[in-house]
Image (cartoon, rainbow, N blue to C red):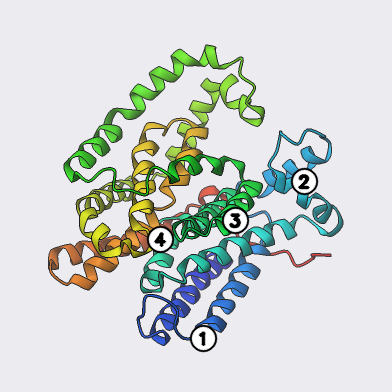
Amino acid sequence: MLLAYTIYTLVFVFTMSLMRLSVKINRNSNVIENNEIWPIWYMITLFYTLTIGTRENVGIDYLSYKYHFLLVESSNNFLTKDLIYYLFLPIVNNYGYNWFILFLAFITIWYFLQIMKENIHIVVWCFFFFFGLGIFFLSLNIMRQTAASFIIFYSITKFLKKDYISFSFHFIFALVIHKAGIIVLPLLFIVQRDILKSVKLQLVLFFICLTCGNFFFNNILSLLTDRLSFLNLGQYNYYIRNIDYVLAKTARNYSEANSTGLFVLLLIVVDTVAIYFSPLLKSNYNKNGFILFYNLYYIGIILHPILLSHETGVRLASYFVFYRFYIYATLFHFIFKSRNNILLRVFCIYVLISCIAYYYVTIYRCRMEIAPYQFIFNFF
């Protein structure tokens, strides 16, 4: 456990310190204007990749991905697993499984930094909430989805610039890693506009979904289960045919992962504050497409409580809840920059302290099997 605390503290502190240094070097500009920043960012990339990519048997999904490679090797059906398994199979067979883990760690941090190139004014906040909201620990488990989420985020920045060739390339790359990311694509053409301008309507819809959305969804799902059983959904057939077991399993997993109930309530409060301030955030930060990312985030926070008791649904909703770290970063940057409401700033400080506490409670309780930590250095 001591190694786990040491590694996770080093990753947190080292990354945050270098990010803060890069902002100072850049003289608080919104985009990178000083080439001295790049060596710092390359250092972060190397440190993160080597530290997280060389772990062994850390995280629930570490061994499950290894099992997927065995299934791919014994199957000729390209529809059963994501394409990345087939592409990486020769490397895994010849050089070892951890090259795949190393690749995912590199992709995650590389695309994260690429996104931040034009958001350097909130880069420290973004990295803080990457760690403080637990996305970092998710990246040790649902590794492919987290990596794909960052690639999709980056591809959307290209979409907003009308660089459709680059957008298409990176989005397809994300689908190669995790094909479920396709769920984001059709929404991009809808959520560019400010479709929900009314704060009151947003809050009402949010709290309706929060309080009773899951109840209605479960009842509807129970009615449809028999009718859906005939569908051929490839690897997702399991979730339809074993719906009762999946619901029970998800409930147990969710209870364990969110046993810090006060932190979950705190996120609801911060989500409410973000919705309340959304008109001001949209007007002040839309230069880099804030409205689109806010809409994706809002879809996530209303979908997540509805799909809470279904494992596949939570995974799909996570593609949208993922943008919470970016919205929180923008919100906190706005609040501390405005310096108007002292009580609100005190509340924000409480949230920051809670995030740090949550980070270490997660390590202490070994959630998602992120601890104990161990390395592997035999890559050949």
Name the one closer to the observer, 104 or 233.
233
Q: Residue 229 vs residue 354: left or right?
A: right
Q: CA distance from mark 2 to mark 4?
A: 34 Å
Q: Residue at x 55, y 75 (%)?
A: 44
Q: Please give the residue where the numbered disc 1 appears in the rendered image.
A: 35
Q: Secondary structure at mark 3?
A: helix
Q: Quadrant of the N terminus?
A: bottom right
In this figure, which residue is indicated by the disc labeled 2? 86
Q: CA distance from mark 1 to mark 3?
A: 25 Å
Residue type, label 1: Asn
Q: Could you give the CA–CA distance between mark 3 and mark 4, rounded to whole angstroms?
A: 27 Å
The answer to whether the residues at label 2 and label 3 have Cβ atoms under 8 Å apart is no
What residue did someone put label 3 on?
Answer: 170
Residue 281, placed above or below residue 78: below
The residue that mark 4 highlights is 132
Q: Amino acid at mark 2?
A: Tyr
Q: Left or right: 216 with respect to 3?
A: left
Residue in view at x 20 percent, y 36 percent: 204
Could you tell me residue 343's position as x and y percent? 13, 64
**Can you tell which of label 3 and label 4 is closer to the viewer?**
3
